[in-house]
Image (cartoon, rainbow, N blue to C red):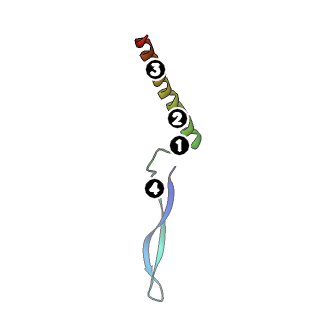
Amino acid sequence: MTEQVYVCAELGTTMLGGTDCKKWVAYQTKPDFIPLTQSQVYEIGGILVLFFSAIVIYMMLVKAIKTA
């Protein structure tokens, strides 16, 4: 998801001698991260928990078989 911001492209002077923006342009910024929804984050987190749990269970079983 990109964010759209407006940037002054051309400055001009006012009647009182100040500066003002004469022309605005739209500028789209790129996100610094992979855009994920909250449900996708939960899904990925659940898969990682299951994966590491399976590794821990496997290591416990291997240790139990070696000591038996």
| Secondary structure type for disc 4 | strand
Position of residue 28 relative to residue 62, above or below, is below
In the rendered structure, which disc, 4 or 2, sits on the residue that comes first in sequence? 4
Q: Residue at x 43, y 50 (%)?
A: 32
**Which residue was labeled with disc 2?**
44
Between disc 2 and disc 3, the foreground one is 3
Q: CA distance from mark 1 to mark 3?
A: 34 Å
- Most extreme residue toward the right is 39
Query: Would you say the residues marked 1 and 2 are in contact, meaning their CB atoms lie under 8 Å apart?
Result: yes
Classify mark 2: residues with Cα within 10 Å, few (<14), some (14-19) or many (20+).
few
| Secondary structure type for disc 2 | helix
Between disc 1 and disc 2, the foreground one is 2
Q: Residue at x 52, y 28 (%)?
A: 50
Q: Position of residue 46 (x, y in %)?
A: 55, 33
| Secondary structure type for disc 3 | helix
Instruction: Report the side of 36 relative to 19 (left or right).
Output: right
Q: How many numbered marks are there?
A: 4
In the image, 2 versus 14, the foreground residue is 2
In the rendered structure, which disc, 1 or 3, sits on the residue that comes first in sequence? 1
Classify mark 4: residues with Cα within 10 Å, few (<14), some (14-19) or many (20+).
few
Q: CA distance from mark 4 to mark 3?
A: 48 Å
**Which residue was labeled with disc 1?**
36
**Which residue was labeled with disc 4?**
29
In the rendered structure, which disc, 2 or 3, sits on the residue that comes first in sequence? 2
In the image, 25 versus 28, the foreground residue is 28
In the rendered structure, which disc, 1 or 2, sits on the residue that comes first in sequence? 1
Three-letter code for the amino acid on which mark 1 is drawn = Leu
Task: Determine which of the numbered discs, if any, sits on residue 60 in the image.
Answer: 3
